[in-house]
Amino acid sequence: MNAKTETTERPLARGIVLVALVLAVAGAVAALMSGIGYRVNWWHFGTGIQMFKWSAYAAILAVGLSVIGLAWSRKSRMVVIPGVLAIIIGGIMVYIPLSWKQALDAYPYIHDITTDVDDPPQFVAVAALRGAGDHPVTYDGPEVASQQQQAYADLQPWNTSTDPATVFAAAMKVLKHMGLEIVASNDSDLHIEATDTSLLYGFKDDVVVRIVETGEGARVDVRSKSRVGRSDLGQNAKRIRTFTEGLKSELSD
C-alpha cells in the first residue's frame, strides 16, 4: 500500500469507527432512558421495551461498522481506540437483550407464582397500589397453576416447628434484608405484604406471606405476582426461593 492510499484510507476508517462509537453510545443512552422514562411516567413500559429493542439494533450496526473500520486500517491508534470502544459498548448492548430472550425461552409465560396453588395467599393492601393497566391481584387460575407445577415443582409450603410469632418476626426481617418495601403487616393475622422494585425499569412485583399456626409449629406460604408483563423471566419463583432460604437460615441461627 503506498503512502497516498494509506493517507486516504485512514481518515475514512476513522470516520467509520467514530460513527460506530456514536451509535453504540447513543444506543446505550437510549436503553438507559427507556427504563428511566418508564419510572418517571414519561411513557408506557411497552414503549420503553421498544426503545431498548432499537438500541440493540443500533448496537449491532455499531459492532459491524467497527469491524469494517478496524479491518480497513488497524495501524492507527485514532482508529483502534474508538473502534474497540464501540465493539465493547455495542457488545454489551447486544448481550443484554439476548440474555433476556434466553430467559424468555427458558421460563413459562406466567407471572403469578405461589407455594400453594390450591389456596394461594391473598393480596389485600397492595390491591390499592395497582393501577388500571396492571394485573389484578386475583390468582391467575388452574392453567397457570399447571404451568407453575411443571416449571417450579420445588416451590412448596414450608412447615417449621418454630412458633408462629417467631416466624412472623423472622419473615419481616428477611423481607427487609431482601430490599422489599413492607406495604402491610399484621402480627395478629400473621399476614405480610411487600413490594419489590427492579433497578432500571422500576417494575414492581408484589409479595404476600401467610403464616398459619399448626399443631407442631407453623406453615409458611408465599406468593409473588408481577404488576405488568406476561413473563416474569423466572423472577417471582427466584424471589420465593430466596425468601424461603433466608427464612430457614434466620430461624436456624
Image (spheres, grey):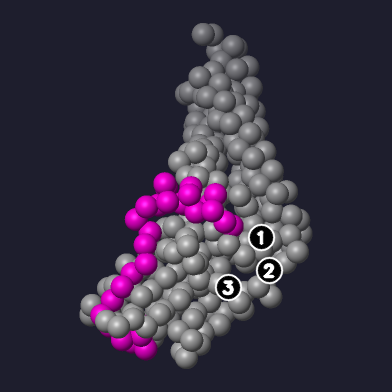
Q: Is residue 181 above or below residue 131?
A: below
The answer to whether mark 2 and mark 1 are in CB contact below 8 A is: yes
Is residue 193 part of the magenta span, yes or no? no
**Residues under labels 2 and 1: Cα distance?**
8 Å
Label 3: few (<14), some (14–19) or many (≥20) C-alpha neighbours in 10 Å: many
Position of 158 with respect to 43 (left or right) is left
| Of labels 3 and 2, the one closer to you | 3
**Residues under labels 3 and 2: Cα distance?**
11 Å
Residue that sits furthest to the left in the current view: 253
Residue 239 image point, x, y percent: 44, 62
The amino acid at mark 3 is Phe
- Location of mark 2 (residue): 130
Pointer 3 or 1: first along the chain: 3
Label 2: few (<14), some (14–19) or many (≥20) C-alpha neighbours in 10 Å: some
- Location of mark 3 (residue): 123
- Location of mark 1 (residue): 135
Q: Nearer the viewer, residue 206 or 38?
A: 206
Quadrant of the image occupied by residue 57? top right
The amino acid at mark 2 is Arg
Quadrant of the image occupied by residue 200? bottom right
Residue 159 image point, x, y percent: 31, 73
Residue that sits furthest to the top in the current view: 1
Pointer 3 or 2: first along the chain: 3
Pointer 2 or 1: first along the chain: 2
